[in-house]
Amino acid sequence: MRGRYPSGPEFVLKLRGSDLAKKRALVLLETLMGKWRVQEACARLELSEQRLDQIRIDGLQGMVDALEPRPSGRPAKVLSPAELEVEQLQARIAELEAEKKAALIRAELAVTLPQARAVESKKASRSPRRKKRRPAARKRL
């Protein structure tokens, strides 16, 4: 058989948590493996059988809950009310800045367009006009 041997219950000691929680988890796993009888585990942890049973149920239920399948990927970020308000205000600022730019462009166009119309009308007045033809006089007979 290839590969390394799996870690036993002592792996619990490498996890994060208080020393008491690690000791309880270690004794529970060893009890499940058959290393200790329930009375011996109770003596090691200084607990009653009822309390040991409660701890075993809670610990195993927590493990089962943690191993439930979950959607893949990073969970959606949940914003606090303050963070949500900051995001909304930033969006409003961006919207107002866009409106300000549009207003500046409209003002610039309003100043520029009348001058362009005046230049066009001057060019139009300089162009030669056609003379209106008078109807030819009728010859009298």
Image (cartoon, rainbow, N blue to C red):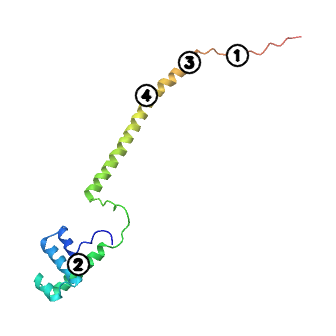
Residue 132's label in the rendered image is 1
Q: Element at badge 4?
A: helix
Depth order, front residue of 120/53: 53
Looking at numbered disc 2 in the image, what kind of residue is underneath it? Gly
Tell me: residue 42, above or below residue 124. Answer: below
Residue 63 x %, y %: 27, 75
Residue 59's label in the rendered image is 2
Q: Distance between the residues labelled 4 and 1?
A: 38 Å
Residue 123's label in the rendered image is 3
* Residue reaching furthest to the right: 141
Q: How far apart are marks 2 and 3 (CA)?
A: 92 Å
What residue lies at 42% left-to-right and 30% top-to-bottom? Answer: 108
Q: Distance between the residues labelled 3 and 1?
A: 21 Å
Q: Distance between the residues labelled 4 and 3?
A: 20 Å
Looking at numbered disc 4 in the image, what kind of residue is underneath it? Val
Q: In this view, does 32 lie to the left or right of 123?
A: left
The answer to whether the residues at label 4 and label 3 have Cβ atoms under 8 Å apart is no
Tag 1: Cα neighbours inside 10 Å, few (<14), some, or many (≥20)? few
Tell me: residue 102, above or below residue 39. Answer: above
Quadrant of the rendering where the C terminus is positioned: top right
Tag 4: Cα neighbours inside 10 Å, few (<14), some, or many (≥20)? few
Closer to the chain start, of discs 4 and 2, is 2
For discs 4 and 2, the disc positioned in front in the rendered view: 2
Looking at numbered disc 1 in the image, what kind of residue is underneath it? Lys
Q: Element at badge 3?
A: helix
Closer to the chain start, of discs 4 and 1, is 4
Q: Element at badge 1?
A: loop
Residue 44 x %, y %: 11, 82
Q: Label 4, on which residue?
A: 111
